[in-house]
Amino acid sequence: HKPTKPSSPAGQFLMSNKLETAMWLSRLFTVYCSVMFILPILGPYAAANFYQRALLANALTSALRLHQRLPRFQLSRAFLAQALQEDSCHYLLYSLILVNSYPITSILSP
């Protein structure tokens, strides 16, 4: 079975820019989860889940951005130093450290 190309120009654009599309969708999901946490329409337990999902989606966005900015992975001190200089690495660590913390609205603000 041969995969077919999308016939619409928008579909072609999204398929030709897969990394940017994934980042855009993860950012959109982060905003959605943040709003669902702030406005707990589905109850307090669902709000806590949306809090974690928002942080994990932000971690995904940061990891994709870090992947874009860094060269191929190497287990070296120079690579680690370069990674730690990137803002996206800081946001990735921020999200991963706080994902299991008690839900606090101000944590989602950055």
Image (cartoon, rainbow, N blue to C red):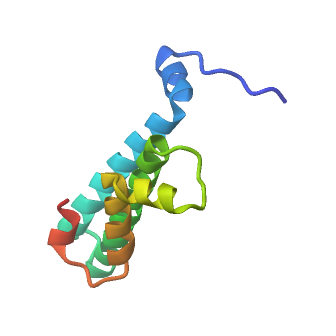
What quarter of the picture does the C terminus occupy? bottom left
Residue pictured at 50% horizontal, 38% vertical: 19
In depth, the one of 71 and 43 nearer the eye is: 71
Can you give x and y, in whole percent of width and height, for residue 91 in the image?
A: 32, 60
- Residue 33 seen from this side: yes
Q: In the image, what residue occupies the spot 81% across and 26% down? A: 2
* Quarter residue 83 falls in: bottom left
Q: Position of residue 37 (x, y in %)?
A: 24, 68
- Closer to the camera in the image, 83 or 78: 78
Look at 22% across and 59% down and name the residue there.
35
Displayed quadrant of residue 81: bottom left
**Residue 64 image position (x, y, % from top left):** 46, 48
- Where residue 71 sits in the image (x, y, percent)? 53, 43
Q: Quadrant of the N terminus?
A: top right
- At 50% from the left and 27% from the top, the residue drawn is 14
Q: Residue furthest bottom?
A: 102
Q: Residue furthest right?
A: 1
